[in-house]
Amino acid sequence: MSKAIDNLQAAQQRAMAIRPKVGGFPYLAEVLRLAGVRRNVWSLPACQSLYVTKDGPVVTLGTPLATGTADVPPFDREALIKALRTDQAGESTFSEFLEASWRAGVVRYDIDFSGRTVAYYGCNGEVYIESYPAVEVK
């Protein structure tokens, strides 16, 4: 494995150990930021995650939400916000969040760790941007 992969995986493990069940994303994001992760771009429904890190880019391939040929759902801002709030309340798993985001028409989302924002994109140029709070991790 490369230094980039080792560093990313260690940061992910640390973040999962300290993040609270409710409102845990900012803790995950801060641990990744401190480890030198600058951006994280998710492509749905493939569940491909690209991490841009100080040590080099790393890609993670998850279990796809769809296979073969599929219609892309229309972008539904309200459904996306509902999926976000459900996840933020600790009432969904990450897999359920990804699935709900896809059903809301999200084809990509981009996390900017220094700007503390996540931009969610539909296939026709739609975008919803949400900021997340700064947190302190020990």
Image (cartoon, rainbow, N blue to C red):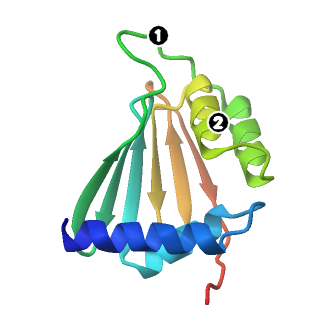
The answer, for residue 115, to whether it is visible in the render is no
Amino acid type for the residue under numbered disc 2: Glu
The N terminus lies in quadrant: bottom left
Could you tell me residue 131's position as x and y percent?
63, 61
The C terminus - image quarter: bottom right
Residue 38 in picture, x, y percent from top left: 37, 69
Q: Which amino acid, by three-letter code, is at mark 1? A: Asp
Side of 118 where 132 appears, left or right: right
Check disc 2: other Cα within 10 Å, few if <14, some if 14-19, many if 20+: some
Mark 1 falls on what kind of element? loop
Residue 101 in view: yes
Q: CA distance from mark 1 to mark 2?
A: 19 Å
Q: Which residue in the protein does label 2 denote?
A: 96
Q: Position of residue 98 (x, y in %)?
A: 57, 37
Which circle marks residue 23 in the picture? none
**At x 53% / y 32%, what residue is drawn?**
106
Residue shown at 81% from the left, 52% from the top: 89
Occupied quadrant, residue 103: top right
Name the residue located 42 percent from the left edge and 29 percent from the top edge.
Answer: 64
Q: Name the residue carrying label 1.
A: 71
The residue shown at (63%, 54%) is 130
Q: Residue furthest bottom?
A: 138
Q: In this rendering, is residue 18 above or below 124?
A: below
Residue 60 placement, left or right of 13: left
53 displayed left or right of 17? left
Observer-side mark, 1 or 2, equals 2
Give the mark nearest the N terminus, 1 or 2.
Answer: 1
Q: Residues within 10 Å of mark 1 (few under 14, many from 20)?
A: few
User: In the figure, 45 relative to 7: above or below?
Assistant: above
Q: Position of residue 24 (x, y in %)?
A: 68, 64
Mark 2 residue element: helix
Identify whether 59 is placed above or below 108: below
